Image (spheres, rainbow, N blue to C red):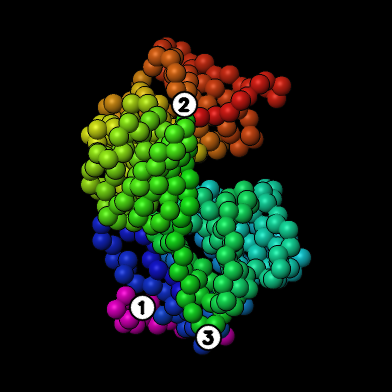
Amino acid sequence: MHWFPKSAAGGGKKTGSDLFVLTSTDGKIHLISKTGRVEKSIEAHKGAVLAGRRSYDGSALVTGSSVYGIAWGPDSDQVLFTNGRQLVIKSLQPNAKPTMWKAHGGVILNVDWNPVNNLILSGGPRRRLFGIPMVEYVVYNSSAHEYPITSVAWTPYGELFPVGSFNTLRICDQAGWSYSLEKSNTGSLFKLAWSGDGTQEAGACGNGQVLIGHLIERRLEWKNYEATVVSSKQVDVRNVVNDVKDKLDFRDRIIKLSFAYSHLSVATSSQCYIFNVRNFNTPMIFDLKEDNVTLILQAEKHFVLVDTAGVYVYSYDGRMVSSPRYAGMRADVLNYQTVALSNDTIAIRDKTDEKVVYVFDAQTGKNLGDGKPITHKLEVMEIALDQCGPATERRLAIVDKNRDLYVTSVRKFGGERKTHKFRQHDSILGME
């Protein structure tokens, strides 16, 4: 079962967005509306259809018989599926050779491929879990679990993933670190799915029940303050110096929050709240254009909100300052590694051409300089802007596909941009 992707529908209504795909044991594929009406049935396979997924852009559907797991590539032009102990990536381009490799020592039961971080998850009966960026190298190989891994599923924006097993649900980050372990008397978790905002998950259990979970206990720190999401609609703030506590209640479900530069920014499903650490009782509040904020980045003078429709720069008094954009921008796949913010500049790595970084004036939203983006020699994996000094001396840090670090000037005053590559023996303290 798979719903039409929310990112494909965007902010407006799109044909097919109220339909979900249901595969069956008789080889048929059914398109069903949210009212339960069967809109169309297709004779697709001989034998049970074990997997079916809509593409991220909503334009295509892939199903598999005798295939335990299947997933689309980030650009909806490739399909990943299981083949016994192997994983196979098949391009939709004609005559393209598939990529195949042995991923597990036993049959692979489930896979997922996240469009934001480009990482592949796979799990199987040997009780091990793998995280792979395409097929270059294994990011994470778990130790053996107590029971076979029966389900995995990335959050929509690739920050976390749950692992389902017999009477067990574990939450991990993309590096493989375990954040939470829940034991439930539900049997094996055969399928996991996330809400569009990544705050709730549902699991299909072996005993016939449906498990519903909410992400809580997220904790952020800024100087002597710590903010903790204690429920879906409440944040507790504590001053660790004098142990003064504030309870912040919200009307709607909390989607994203960020804590920096003396301001706590909280996005719910309908509004954004801006709290100053000097007074948590009177926040600035404004309504959101979309109900699905995917990213909040802060600088000293303003902050950025990203949703599935666009990128918006706001001041801390709730006033929208600018909305930078470029042709072909895909806001739905932006994350903290591909967007950077300073007091005067915002940088965005392009998804269509990952060698390109667009830089904008944060106050106006216009392209800086001659309007041409910064083009690197290799695909850019992560970017960051320095936070100090005047705008004329702003620097952009780039980590490319080879994991090399470059620092380049943002503003070009005649000639070429000055770029410095850090050698391995250079001292690097961090990127922010």
Q: Which residue is drawn at 30% across and 34% down?
A: 279
Marks 3 and 1, how far apart at CA:
16 Å
Q: In this view, does 10 lie above or below 85?
A: above
Task: Count residues near mark 1 (Cα–Cα under 10 Å), then give few for <14, some for 14-19, many for 20+.
Answer: many
Disc tally is 3
Q: Mark 2 near mark 3, Cβ–Cβ under 8 Å?
A: no
Q: Is residue 421 left or right of residue 327?
A: right
Residue in the image at 47% along x and 23% along y:
386
Q: Which residue lies furthest to the top in this view?
A: 414
SS assignment at label 2: strand
Confirm whether the magenta stretch covers residue 411: no
Q: Which amino acid does label 2 sit on?
A: Leu
Dots 2 and 1: beta carbons under 8 Å? Answer: no
Q: Position of residue 208 (x, y in %)?
A: 51, 82
Q: What residue type is labelled 3?
A: Thr
Classify 10 Å Cα crowding around label 2: few (below 14), some (14-19), many (20 and above).
many
Q: Residue at x 71, y 21 (%)?
A: 425
Whole-number angstrom distance, CA of label 2 to CA of label 1:
47 Å
From which residue to which does the magenta span run?
A: 31-47
Q: Which quarter of the figure has residue 427?
A: top right
Q: Badge 3 is on which residue?
A: 25
Q: Which of marks 2 and 3 is in front?
A: 2
Task: Please name which of the two marks, 2 or 1, marks the residue nearer to the observer.
Answer: 2
Label 3 crowd (10 A; few <14 / some 14-19 / many >=20): few
Is residue 44 part of the magenta span, yes or no?
A: yes
Q: Along the line of sight, which residue is nearer the eye, 418 or 308? A: 308
Residue at x-position 40% and y-position 14%: 390
Residue at image mark 2: 385
Residue 315 in the figure: left or right of residue 401: left
**Three-letter code, disc 1:** Ile
The residue wearing badge 1 is 32
